[in-house]
């Protein structure tokens, strides 16, 4: 489809309006999660590791009978900046070398990785944003293909579904977080409008000196149990996601990163912690317990991981990952 001069942009206000329609609700827990991701990237930058962490993205699998769980793809979007023109004729960017190296690890374990770059064909029309996919992790650079692209194991939708049906209050989202969240959400909705899929978010990927780590990042206060002492909880959903990487892994590992705070109102940083999934699975409680409000608003169910099994995330430990 051709749009106008195909050299248009989307404004900050339109990004915010779109997020209000695509996100079901923005509770305090979800907001704190967004803030923690931003603060983590700022912290990593102060340690000199800013080129070792990707932006967030999506892990998708088809839901077709007899193929469920067999075809998995990772999508990492380019961040669309407000008021910047993205002409159809522009040279689409190549992702940073670290993302290419990460994708090669994912390719080894059967997860196809795509970097997704946008063009915008009409001013302030989110329908005019076209995503272009290039597959990563292969021996040679692959050309960009405009979405939709044929994907094995993903079934095409035969009718439209109302993904943009919400009216969330986005005033609490920090302004500097809007472009990245908009880029991620627009890619998710675009994909889901075309394919039936199960999609979960990836907070980011850290490539260390030894291996590559998809990570789950949460902001937590430490709870206390009379038997195991201080502990951090992890929801069952993210636990399953990290277990998926462990089952596929080859030379791929994953991390659970915690921004420990003193209390949920002031959110003062206590310390950054991490645990590898291997240790998490070894020391997590075998019984679940009720947690607080989840990211989507419902009550959560968590496993308990003793705080003593976490390591501080600092420049010394980063250099050993």
Image (cartoon, rainbow, N blue to C red):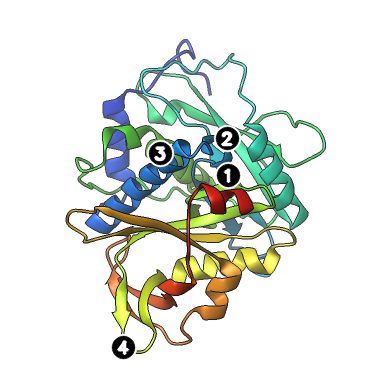
List x then y, in percent, for residue 91. Answer: 62, 17
Q: Residues within 10 Å of mark 1 (few under 14, many from 20)?
A: many
User: Gap in Å between the C-alphas at discs 3 and 2?
Assistant: 24 Å
Which is closer to the viewer, label 4 or label 1? 4
Q: Please give the residue where the numbered disc 4 appears in the rendered image.
A: 226
Checking the image for residue 75, the label placed there is 1
Element assignment for label 4:
loop
Q: Is residue 21 left or right of residue 254?
A: left
Q: Give the answer, above or below, for where 138 lies relative to 68.
A: above
Checking the image for residue 42, the label placed there is 3
Q: Please give the residue where the numbered disc 2 appears in the rendered image.
A: 116
Element assignment for label 2:
strand
Q: Residues within 10 Å of mark 3 (few under 14, many from 20)?
A: few
Along the line of sight, the residue nearer the viewer: 29 or 83: 29
Q: Residue furthest right?
A: 139
Of callouts 1 and 2, which one flags the residue occurring earlier in the amino acid sequence? 1
List x then y, in percent, for residue 92. Answer: 61, 22
Q: Is residue 252 left or right of residue 23?
A: right
List x then y, in percent, for residue 124. Answer: 34, 22
Of callouts 3 and 2, which one flags the residue occurring earlier in the amino acid sequence? 3
Q: Is residue 65 left or right of residue 6?
A: right
Of callouts 2 and 4, which one flags the residue occurring earlier in the amino acid sequence? 2
Along the line of sight, the residue nearer the viewer: 111 or 253: 253
Of callouts 4 and 1, which one flags the residue occurring earlier in the amino acid sequence? 1
Q: Residue furthest top?
A: 5
Of callouts 4 and 3, which one flags the residue occurring earlier in the amino acid sequence? 3
User: Gap in Å between the C-alphas at discs 4 and 1?
Assistant: 43 Å
Of callouts 3 and 1, which one flags the residue occurring earlier in the amino acid sequence? 3
Element assignment for label 1:
strand
Quarter of the image containing the C terminus?
Answer: bottom right
């Amino acid at each position: 489809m051709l749009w106008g001069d195909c050299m248009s942009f989307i404004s900050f206000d339109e990004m915010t309006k779109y997020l209000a329609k695509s996100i079901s609700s923005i509770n305090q827990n979800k907001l704190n999660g967004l803030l923690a991701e931003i603060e983590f990237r700022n912290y990593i930058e102060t340690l000199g590791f800013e080129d070792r962490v990707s932006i967030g993205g999506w892990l998708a699998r088809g839901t077709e009978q007899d193929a469920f769980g067999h075809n998995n793809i990772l999508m990492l979007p380019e961040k669309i900046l407000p008021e910047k023109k993205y002409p159809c004729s522009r040279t689409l960017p190549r992702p940073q070398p670290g993302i290419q190296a990460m994708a090669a690890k994912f390719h080894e374990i059967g997860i196809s990785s795509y970097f997704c770059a946008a063009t915008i064909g009409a001013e302030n029309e989110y329908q005019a944003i076209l995503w272009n996919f290039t597959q990563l992790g292969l021996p040679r650079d692959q050309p960009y293909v405009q979405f939709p692209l044929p994907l094995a194991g993903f079934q095409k939708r035969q009718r439209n579904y109302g993904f943009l049906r919400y009216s969330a209050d986005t005033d609490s989202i920090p302004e500097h977080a809007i472009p990245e969240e908009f880029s991620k959400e627009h890619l998710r909705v675009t994909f889901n409008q075309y394919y039936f899929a199960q999609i979960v978010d990836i907070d980011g990927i850290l490539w260390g000196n030894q291996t590559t780590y998809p990570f789950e990042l949460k902001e937590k206060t430490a709870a206390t149990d009379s038997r195991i002492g201080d502990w951090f909880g992890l929801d069952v959903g993210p636990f399953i996601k990290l277990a998926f990487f462990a089952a596929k892994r080859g030379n791929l590992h994953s991390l659970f990163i915690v921004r420990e705070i003193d209390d949920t109102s002031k959110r003062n940083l206590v310390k950054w912690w991490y645990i590898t999934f291997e240790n998490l699975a070894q020391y997590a409680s075998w019984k679940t317990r009720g947690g607080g409000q989840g990211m989507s608003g419902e009550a959560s169910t968590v496993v308990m991981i003793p705080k003593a099994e976490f390591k501080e995330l600092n420049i010394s430990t980063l250099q050993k990952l």
